[in-house]
Amino acid sequence: QVQLVESGGGVVQPGRSLRLSCLASGFIFSNAPMNWVRQAPGKGLEWVAVISYDGSNQYYADSVKGRFTISRDNSKSILYLQMNSLRAEDTAVYYCARKHFDDYFDYWGQGTLVTVSS
Amino acid sequence: DIQMTQSPSTLSASVGDRVTITCRASQSIHKWLAWYQQKSGKAPKLLIYEASTLEGGVPSRFSGSGSGTEFTLTISSLQPDDFATYYCQQYTRYWTFGQGTKVEIK
């Protein structure tokens, strides 16, 4: 069955960096566009970034553009999110989610918590 | 950017009630709308896509309707497992979620 397992979250000071990972299994990872979605404590869902199946295209929400980078290693079935210049407002649970061919998100990981605080 | 607005924000209901949640888009999104259920501390789960198509394994008491800018999610007879927060999502141009509707026990 499809499994997405995020890791790499933790507490980080403002201005510092963190890299999240999402290990995929149960499907052909190299065929699937992938996303990161975040949820601030007690708040709703916010799409963060998407990457094409082969990594050649990436798109970002305005709130993270220029600071975050989405990438993937298809040989290891891992999705990444490099987060630089972190701000308090980046505090959230970060989910990876698989994009179905028809563009909605059909599978989600369990999430990893990132807390930006001094 | 396409904005999604859900109503109500919170809904109090009893087991067996018929529940309806509304989602409005700031511009036409045709039928490119999904609904997700999220329980506390868990990942969202896909319920419905293309406004009205039920994802496999989702109980038939869930249904979706609408097109253009106005959509609804209906639970025909609320069950104990349905108390959760529900989000709509447009996927016409990138992805935007509604702010969520919490369905709580009356």
Image (cartoon, rainbow, N blue to C red):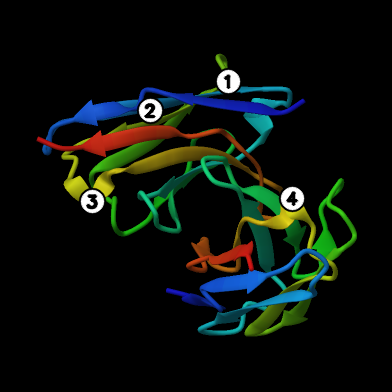
Q: Are marks 1 and 4 on the same chain?
A: no
Point out the image quarter for the N terminus of chain A: top right
The answer to whether one can see residue A58 in this image is no
Tag in front: 2 or 4: 4
- How many angstroms separate mark 2 from mark 4 (CA)? 32 Å
Q: What residue is pinned by disc 3? A: A89
A42 relative position to A117: left or right? right
Name which residue type carries label 3.
Glu
Q: What residue is pinned by disc 1? A: A77
Q: Nearer the viewer, residue B101 or A76?
A: B101
Picture layout, residue A37 above or below residue B87:
above
User: Residue farthest to the front?
Assistant: B106
Which x, y percent locates residue B54? 84, 59
Q: Are marks 1 and 2 on the same chain?
A: yes
Picture layout, residue A28 above or below residue A92:
above
Q: Residue at x 49, y 39 (%)?
A: A95
Q: Nearer the viewer, residue B87 or A96?
A: B87
Q: What residue is pinned by disc 2? A: A20
